[in-house]
Image: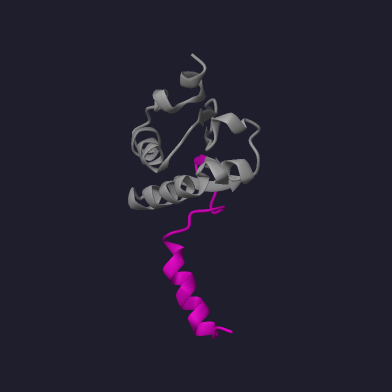
């Protein structure tokens, strides 16, 4: 078993890597992490989002969390972005590079990454 000091050190080390389920941020990013999402590659997407949000110093404005099944398995991995007063944006067929684009262009720049949305795949 770890000592209390060791556990505290682990907590501090991981603190900057985790932005999950914390705060009352203006923007909430949700990654579908059910079995189908994980099998399609949602874990690297989640990790890329958390890292990019931290690197962009957006942790006070953006909360990244995970959910279960979104119900659109054929479009996994799925990322949904919720902003107060705006319509939800659903990104589909995500990967780590697309996740970084979403952080840079949408969350930081305010411009929806249209070619990654569900609308682009249904056109």
Q: Is residue 123 above or below residue 26?
A: above
Q: Nearer the viewer, residue 82 or 94?
A: 94
Residue for point 45% across, 64% down: 15
The answer to whether residue 58 of the structure is visible from this angle is: no
Residue 55 position within the rendered picture, expressed as x and y whole percent measured from the top left = 33, 52
Q: Which residues are magenta?
A: 1-28
Left or right, 18 with reference to 109: right
Q: Nearer the viewer, residue 13 or 108?
A: 13
What colouring does the structure picture have? one colour
Magenta segment: does it hold 13?
Answer: yes
Residue 31 position within the rendered picture, expressed as x and y whole percent measured from the top left = 54, 42
Residue 116 position within the rendered picture, expressed as x and y whole percent measured from the top left = 43, 28
Magenta segment: does it hold 31?
Answer: no
Q: Quadrant of the N terminus?
A: bottom right
| Furthest residue in direction front, as rendered | 39
Left or right, 60 with reference to 80: left
Q: Is residue 6 above or below residue 95?
A: below
* Number of numbered discs on residues: 0
Residue for point 38% across, 31% down: 110
The answer to whether residue 4 of the structure is visible from this angle is: yes
Quadrant of the rendered image containing residue 73: top right
Residue 101 position within the rendered picture, expressed as x and y whole percent measured from the top left = 35, 36
Q: Nearer the viewer, residue 34 or 64?
A: 34
């Amino acid at each position: 078993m770890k000592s209390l000091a060791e556990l505290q050190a682990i907590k501090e080390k991981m603190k900057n890597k985790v932005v999950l389920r914390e705060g009352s941020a203006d923007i909430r990013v949700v990654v579908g992490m059910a079995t189908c999402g994980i099998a399609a590659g949602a874990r690297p997407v989640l990790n890329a989002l958390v890292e990019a949000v931290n690197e962009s110093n957006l942790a006070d404005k953006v909360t990244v969390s995970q959910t279960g099944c979104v119900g659109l398995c054929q479009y996994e991995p799925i990322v949904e972005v919720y902003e107060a007063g705006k319509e939800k944006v659903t990104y589909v067929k995500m990967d780590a590079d697309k996740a970084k684009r979403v952080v840079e262009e949408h969350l930081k720049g305010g411009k929806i990454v249209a070619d990654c949305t569900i609308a682009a795949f249904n056109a």
